Image (cartoon, rainbow, N blue to C red):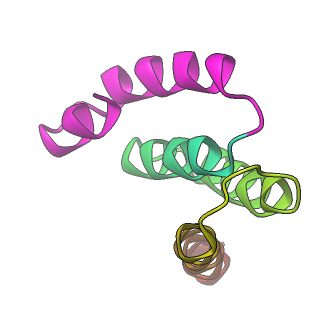
Amino acid sequence: MGYEHLQSGDPKGALEILKLNMSAYPDSANVYDSLSDAYLADGQQDLAGEYAQKALDKLETDSTPNEDRKKLIRESAEQKLKQLGAKQ
């Protein structure tokens, strides 16, 4: 649902939903990467970078057994950090 809000141009609505998701799944790296996307869409670059880094940190202990999924999350978070580093 969070990404549906992002796709419809409602990053604030996406943030509300994704924050609830983070409360429900605090150990999921994917949740933090998704929040990073929403903060980036909302123009909050500092928070986007913070949550991209949290996604990378969570990957070490994330219980997701799918290594391909973890790789995609890592690539997504690293790409955002690189993009944000160039803008800062």
Return the x and y of residue 82 as percentages of the image width and height. Answer: 63, 82
Q: In this orientation, which residue lies closer to the viewer: 87 or 59?
A: 59
Above or below, 38 against 72 in this view is above
Magenta span covers which residues?
1-27
Return the x and y of residue 59 as percentages of the image width and height. Answer: 78, 60
Above or below, 27 against 87 in this view is above
Q: In this orientation, which residue lies closer to the viewer: 7 or 29?
A: 29
Which quadrant is home to the N terminus?
A: top left
State the residue at coordinates (56%, 50%): 36
Position of residue 41 in the picture relative to residue 78 (left or right): left
Return the x and y of residue 17 as percentages of the image width and height. Answer: 42, 20
Q: Quadrant of residue 32?
A: top right
Position of residue 66 in the picture relative to residue 40 (left or right): right
Residue 14 is covered by the magenta coloring: yes
Residue 72 is covered by the magenta coloring: no
Which quadrant is home to the C terminus?
A: bottom right
Above or below, 68 against 35 in this view is below
Furthest residue toward left: 8
Q: In this orientation, which residue lies closer to the viewer: 44 or 15?
A: 15
State the residue at coordinates (63%, 18%): 24
The secondary structure that dominates the magenta segment is helix
Labels in figure, total: 0
Return the x and y of residue 2 as percentages of the image width and height. Answer: 34, 31
Q: In this orientation, which residue lies closer to the viewer: 43 or 59?
A: 59
State the residue at coordinates (63%, 26%): 22
